[in-house]
Image (spheres, grey):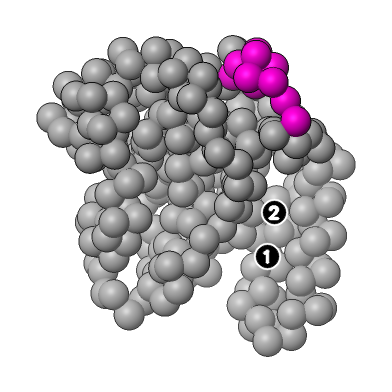
């Protein structure tokens, strides 16, 4: 059954992958009036568009088991984790449809604002983004972009780790073949994602943040993001902003791969520069603009 009810005071971070979305979700969850889904990446819109299988019954059950493991082994977090129990019960409901997704934001522990972060939403296209807006007409959509050279390399290293590959054992040609995969190219195609966002949402509903700016001034970035969401900001609400989440394995980016990525994403960088009227210094040095 689908629902006509809209999600109020909703925000969503749509990527980019390997651009600090996990950090943002974890840190924002410390805000006293912001609810971030306990499962950081819901994957609803990519699931119903048959892009991913992250909402399969097996994967949902696995997350549910891990929740219970944390509940009974992290006793210092008992109050916090026990408060998530009603949300996880909703998460395990079926069928997975608009009603299911909307209800994930109905139980928000008394907080005014609620959201999630799923990088795959960057590749759901205009129809997928229009579906987001149907469920949340006033949605605030945050898109974090990172130097596409270092972002792609980080994504590649993550891919190697997941597939038990040592990036150092692969030839440059092997690595470029992976980077040529359609999914890799989609995640790095900032221009298309931004064009799709602009076609669906008003300018006031979209915020672009540079990963490099966030890490240069994390509290300043959080203040901007809180203002964009519509809530207040106090620095003391955000302890541990220097913590890193999901760091990539360490491996030197080969010059051949760097040249390939610079050629691949030069037009996308030009588009970002035109949209934002600026680029972080790292981008300017990388692309000599």
Q: Looking at the image, which residue is at 79% across and 57% down?
A: 64
Front-lying residue, 209 or 166? 166
Q: Looking at the image, which residue is at 46% across and 48% down?
A: 20
- Crowd rating for badge 1 (residues with CA inside 10 Å; few <14, some 14–19, many 20+): few
Provide the residue designation for mark 1: 86
**Which quarter of the figure is the N terminus placed in?**
top right
At which x and y percent is residue 255?
48, 25
Quarter of the figure with residue 49:
top right
At which x and y percent is residue 206?
28, 35
Disc sitting over residue 90 in the figure: 2
At which x and y percent is residue 125?
47, 17
Front-lying residue, 89 or 117? 117
Residue 31: tell me if it is visible.
yes
Front-lying residue, 263 or 19? 263
Q: Is residue 284 left or right of residue 140?
A: left
Residue 195 drawn in magenta: no
Q: Is residue 152 left or right of residue 219?
A: right
**Segment colored magenta:** 169-179
Q: Residue furthest front?
A: 255
Q: Which secondary structure lies at badge 2?
A: helix
Q: Is residue 197 left or right of residue 72?
A: left
**Which quarter of the figure is the C terminus placed in?**
top left
Front-lying residue, 159 or 14? 159
Residue 176 drawn in magenta: yes
């Amino acid at each position: 059954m689908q629902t006509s009810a809209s999600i109020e005071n909703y925000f969503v971070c749509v990527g980019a992958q390997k651009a600090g979305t996990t950090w943002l979700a974890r840190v924002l969850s410390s805000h006293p009036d912001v609810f971030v889904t306990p499962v950081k990446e819901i994957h609803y819109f990519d699931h119903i568009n048959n892009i991913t299988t992250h909402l399969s019954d097996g994967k949902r059950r696995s997350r549910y088991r891990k929740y219970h493991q944390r509940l009974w082994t992290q006793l210092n977090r008992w109050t916090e984790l026990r408060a998530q129990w009603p949300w996880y019960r909703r998460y395990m409901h079926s069928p997975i449809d608009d009603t299911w997704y909307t209800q994930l934001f109905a139980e928000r522990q008394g907080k005014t604002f609620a959201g999630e972060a799923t990088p795959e939403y960057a590749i759901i296209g205009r129809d997928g983004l229009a579906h987001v807006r149907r469920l949340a007409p006033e949605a605030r959509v945050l898109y974090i972009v990172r130097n596409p050279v270092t972002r792609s390399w980080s994504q590649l290293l993550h891919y190697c780790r997941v597939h038990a590959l040592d990036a150092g054992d692969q030839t440059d040609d092997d690595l470029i073949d992976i980077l040529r995969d359609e999914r890799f190219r989609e995640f790095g195609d900032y221009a298309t994602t931004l064009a799709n966002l602009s076609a669906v949402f008003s300018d006031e509903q979209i915020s672009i943040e540079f990963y490099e700016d966030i890490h240069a001034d994390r509290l300043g970035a959080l203040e901007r993001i809180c203002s964009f969401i519509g809530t207040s900001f106090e620095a003391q609400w955000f302890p541990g902003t220097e913590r890193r989440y999901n760091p990539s394995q360490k491996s030197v980016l080969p010059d051949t791969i760097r040249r390939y990525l610079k050629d691949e994403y030069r037009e996308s960088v030009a588009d970002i520069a035109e949209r934002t009227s600026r680029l972080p210094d790292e981008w300017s040095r990388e692309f000599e603009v």
